[in-house]
Image (cartoon, helix red, strand yellow):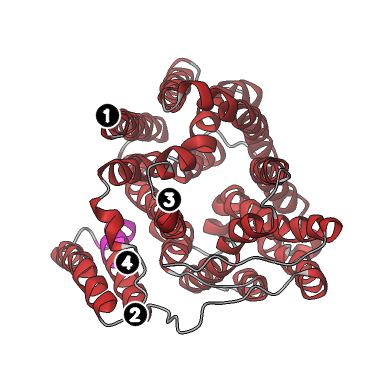
Amino acid sequence: MHQIVTMSVDSSRRWWVLATVVAAQFMFGVDAFIVNVAIPTMAVELHASAAQIEAVIAIYLIAYATLVVAGVAGFSLASLWCGLAQSGPELIIARLAQGATAALMVPQVLATLHLLFADSARARAFGIYGIVLGLAGAAGFLLGGVLVTLDLAGLGWRAVFFVNVPFGTVIIAAALRIMPTVPHSAGTRLDIPGAVVLFAGLLCLIGPLLFGHDVHWSPWVWLVMVGGVAIITAFVPLERGIARGGGVPLIDLALLTDVAFMRGLVAVFFFFFANLSFYLVMTMFMQNALHIPPLQAGLVFVPLALTFVIASRQSGARAKHRGTLVLIEGCALQIAGLAAIAATAALIEVPSALLLALVLMIFGYGQGLVMAPLSSAVLSTVKPASAGAGSGMYGTTTQIGNAAGVAAIGAVFFAIEAASSARLALHAACALFGLSIIICAAFLSWMRRAT
């Protein structure tokens, strides 16, 4: 159970606090997309395999999904390590540290906003948060392309990580000066065994998907995945034991019996399964198959990100009147966007960057319609006393979905690309994206019937 606390901050100062915590969220959002644009260049310079490139993205998400506390300082130092990496495996380990420290930094943002803005200003504060979150995607794609293209001081792709260091330093200085102290509940203990078991289980499940191709799908790969299933199966009994012993488990066990919430989490998983994996596939296809330079590739995604922001702003109001129907419509629009992407790749040998940008806007608008109201729709059935635990489970599910999608769909894309062609690989990936979004829509509809 989470104790409700309040912050004593004067009205004018809290907006500076808002700026600080949102800046931390912005840095995380930019990092989530800035790396995608630089991925092809990293692969060449570090002689990294396709599996290692997938792992650079996925390991960050697995670490994020399993840890509960972190900070900007750790994130900045981990970013520095990423930029100094000399090989694919070292970059994977550095990204693991970066994802873990992001898990310390980002969850505090929403908690801080809830505590500081308990009055009528809350809607405005969360509106600012939503806009910044959407713009972070556009900034990440654009900045990634600019930094790789300019090759500042000969740093190349490393600059996409080094850029976090000065920004992180400024945020740390601001936080030390103006952030209020949040009282903590006495006697609470971090569920280290639960975090370790969840992390190990996810690694055993997702890791083989990342590296299976490199080892020719040896029998031990499947044995590791079976072990991962066994470890994850043991997670819930372990959490029950921790609760009986007076500890605080990673998950609120009572939520496992909330049918609507659990169906909603399945919808969340499949929505995010087709999220970051989509951007990875499109980036690799544009730069490797169409030979679009990094800067242009980054610019292709900017209209999508801006369309996402517009849809996000509109979906909240529409969801108040039409509920989850708006999310289902957004899923349908995403599928239409995927069909347009597949048709463009099939009918035009070398589509221009401008045409791709226009087609991607359809997918981006649909994604914005879903992502913005998704959390409130899924969490709406959760009792107020379990709101904090529900939010944590929601956040963990999003990152597990992202990591699993990058691993699974990325593996399919790279395998078909190597065996046949990048164009066929793109079509296969689009089919998997579409299937994942259809499952998401089905569970959203099923969730409505359980409320």
Residue 449: give its label: 1
The picture places residue 324, in percent across and down from the top left corner, at: 42, 28
Q: Is residue 318 left or right of residue 61?
A: right
Q: Amino acid at mark 3?
A: Thr
Label 1–label 3 contact, CB within 8 A:
no
The answer to whether the residue labelled 1 contacts the one labelled 4, judged by CB atoms less than 8 Å apart, is no
**Would residue 50 be visible to someone looking at this image?**
no
The disc, 1 or 2, on the residue closer to the chain's N-terminal end is 2
Helix, strand or loop under label 4: helix
The Cα atoms of the two marked residues, 1 and 4, are separated by 34 Å
Asked whether 228 or 419 is in front, the reply is 228
Residue visible at 31% across and 81% down in the picture:
246
Residue type, label 2? Gly
Bin the neighbour count of mark 2 within 10 Å (Cα to Cα): few under 14, some 14-19, many 20 and up. some
Whether residue 207 appears in magenta in the rendering, the answer is yes
Q: Is residue 272 above or below residue 21?
A: above
Label 1, label 3: how many angstroms apart (C-alpha)?
A: 23 Å
Residue hosting label 2? 247
Residue 204: x percent and y percent?
26, 66
Q: Earlier in the sequence, mark 3 or mark 4?
A: 4
Element type where label 3 sits in the image: helix
The residues colored magenta run 204-215
Task: Name the residue furthest top.
Answer: 347
Q: Earlier in the sequence, mark 1 or mark 4?
A: 4
Give the quarter of the figure containing the C terminus. top left
